[in-house]
Amino acid sequence: MSAATWADEITVEELEADPYPIYARMRREAPVCFVPAVGLWFVTRWADVEHAASHPELYDSRVTPSPLDRTMGGESILVVDGEPQRRLRAMLDPSLRPRVVEATTPEQIEPIVRDLLDGIADRGEAELMSELFEPVSVLGLGRVLGLGHLEGDTLRRWFRGLAVGATNFEDDAAKWAVSDATGAEIDCELGPVLERLAAEPDGSTIATMLRHAEGELDEKIATILPTLKVILLGGMQEPGHAAGSTVAGLLESGQAEAVAADPAGLVKDAVEEGLRWISPIGTQTRRSVRESELGGARLPVGANLGVLVSSANRDETVWGPTADAFDLQRPKRNHAAFGFGPHFCSGHHFARVQMRIAIQRLFERLPGLRLDPERPPVFRGWEFRAPLHLHVRWHA
């Protein structure tokens, strides 16, 4: 069967269940290949992914049609390039610089992690996605953004609604109904918050964005809200879901005991390997500005690309024959989980610090941590991937 034929038969359900075998076949047989089910040319090899993501003059961010524009309610930082993108990054960068994050994030995240672990430590079992990692992400993000008044369940519901729309490449009307309602709720809830923070800045990320945005207040809010929704989406995916994948990788591979013996010494290595092994955000979307050749495929003007950082992170030519395995001892090198080029994730250091704190404290507090053999983890997703649940036991 030709590459074009079998790619035509790929379904969204197959991608959701496990995209990695599909990506591996593409890397071997058709590294740049059109997938009709999602309307994207998948770019799967490391070199091609890096090239497409790093050259906006060839492949820009204005995918048309893009589920991101509708989901976020306008142009966000993900779909603009050049000076507009630099202006949006300039609003975010002051509060997300590594030095600032290291100075401020631990005091915000440590109490959240401690309280959540206090709530489960005596039980001997828990579901870590819903009882630790997702709450840490949304509550920590809420505090940093200036949304500490919102409940964790509200932020988690917003995340899920936005995620449904952001991944709706198949243009499913039912999914649009969910994401449209979520976007409207966020606009209604956050409009007054932005007005208050503009009048009474408090040093939060939103207040910093307002200070650096241009125009009248209404113009500032219209500029900020789409990118703020991106932050609400990515701010849960990267730290919370990546932490769950990392712990699942450690427990499934038998390498958890090493981390339990030295949590402070090995947590950074565990986090970086976890981000590589299961990239929480698997795709950067791009559009071909001119006719070009990439990975042996001829791309027409306007071709929409799914630039798969998740596949690049399993590329055997970069990571060796064990690329599919979680390996705490893997030789250190940069991975692609936070993307490449001008759209490299602004919040990468914030995500890493949150993950380190949550995973280190988890292994320090819960001796004998292990998977629940009756309820093994199940992963889902291709653009956003994480365990649906992570049931564990320990010695209480």
Image: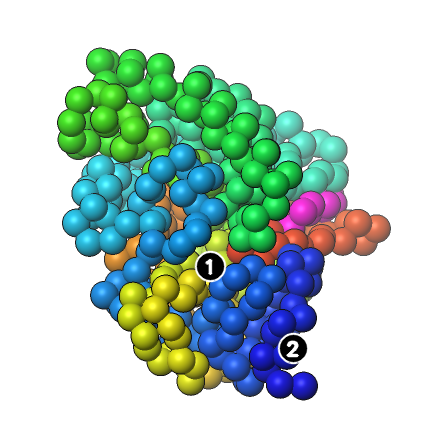
Task: Residue 218 in the image: state x and y as whole percent.
Answer: 25, 21
Q: Residue at x 29, y 70 (%)?
A: 290
Magenta highlight on residue 395: yes
Task: Residue 131 in the image: state x and y as whole percent.
Answer: 64, 34
Hey, what amino acid is under mark 2?
Trp
Task: Residue 384 in the image: state x and y as whole percent.
Answer: 54, 52
Secondary structure under the numbered disc 2 in the rendered image:
helix
- Pointer 2: what residue? 6
The image's colour scheme reads rainbow
Question: Which stretch did the figure color magenta?
Answer: 387-396
Which tag is nearer the camera, tag 2 or tag 1?
Answer: 2
Q: Quadrant of residue 285?
A: bottom left
- Pointer 1: what residue? 283
Q: Residue at x 23, y 14 (%)?
A: 200
Quarter holding the N terminus? bottom right
Which residue ends up furthest to the right in the rendered image? Answer: 374
Task: Residue 69 in the image: state x and y as whole percent.
Answer: 40, 43
Asked if one can make out residue 112 in the rendered structure from this viewpoint, the answer is no
Magenta highlight on residue 79: no
